[in-house]
Amino acid sequence: MNPQTRSGDVPKELGLSSEQLAELMARQRDGSKGPRSHKPPKVGFLQFSIPFLLRLRLEKAPCIVWTMVWALSEAWFITGLGSEHLNPFPLAAIDTEKWKLPRNRKSQALRFLERTRLIKVDRSEPRNPKVTLSWVQLNPP
């Protein structure tokens, strides 16, 4: 932006109102970045073993199960510090909104994974069930 431009002389190309421009300039002066439009990803990639992927293929896992596996793996990776990832971990750690997993499809995928013994769900505390993944090492809290 041209430093000689005053807030009242907003160029038409910017498409900003004078209030928006004033807010932008105030943020620049303060050094604040303002609200983010989206969350940056916490996990850049997910890694799976070939035998595990072949097992899912042999079990004829539907797409929703693959999505649940990705969501579970992300949640497992995020719940922990450094190389110490919790297994079992709380089921509530899964970001179902991000992975677009509605409640009924989530339970369908969990049942499939339990039936094929790829996960174990401990429901001894109904309000806070814990999931144990079979494809990663056990690391209790």
Image (cartoon, rainbow, N blue to C red):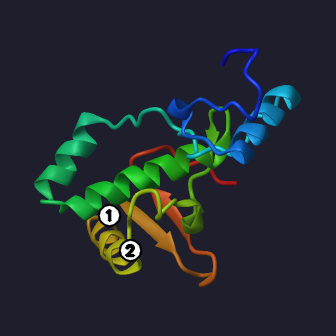
Q: Position of residue 70 (x, y in %)?
A: 38, 50
Q: Could you tell whether 37 is left or right of 62 in the image? A: right
Q: How many labels does the image show?
A: 2
Q: Where is residue 85 in the image (x, y as percent from the top left)?
A: 61, 44
Q: Find the residue positioned furthest to the top.
A: 3
Q: Could you tell whether 34 is left or right of 45 in the image? A: right
Residue depicted at x 65% and y 45%: 17
- Give the CA separation, mark 1 to mark 2: 22 Å
Q: Mark 1 points at which residue?
A: 117
User: Callout 2 environment at 10 Å: few (<14), some (14 to 19), or many (20+)?
Assistant: few
Q: Find the residue positioned furthest to the front.
A: 9
Quadrant hosting residue 42: top right
Q: Position of residue 61 (x, y in %)?
A: 18, 60
Q: Name the residue under label 2.
A: 102
Residue toward you, 123 or 62: 62
Residue depicted at x 38% and y 34%: 47
Which residue type does callout 1 highlight?
Answer: Arg
Q: Find the residue positioned furthest to the right.
A: 30
Residue depicted at x 60% and y 81%: 124
The answer to whether residue 134 shows anywhere in this view is no
Residue depicted at x 73% and y 36%: 24
Picture layout, residue 107 above or below residue 135: below
**What is the secondary structure assignment of the residue under circle 2?**
loop
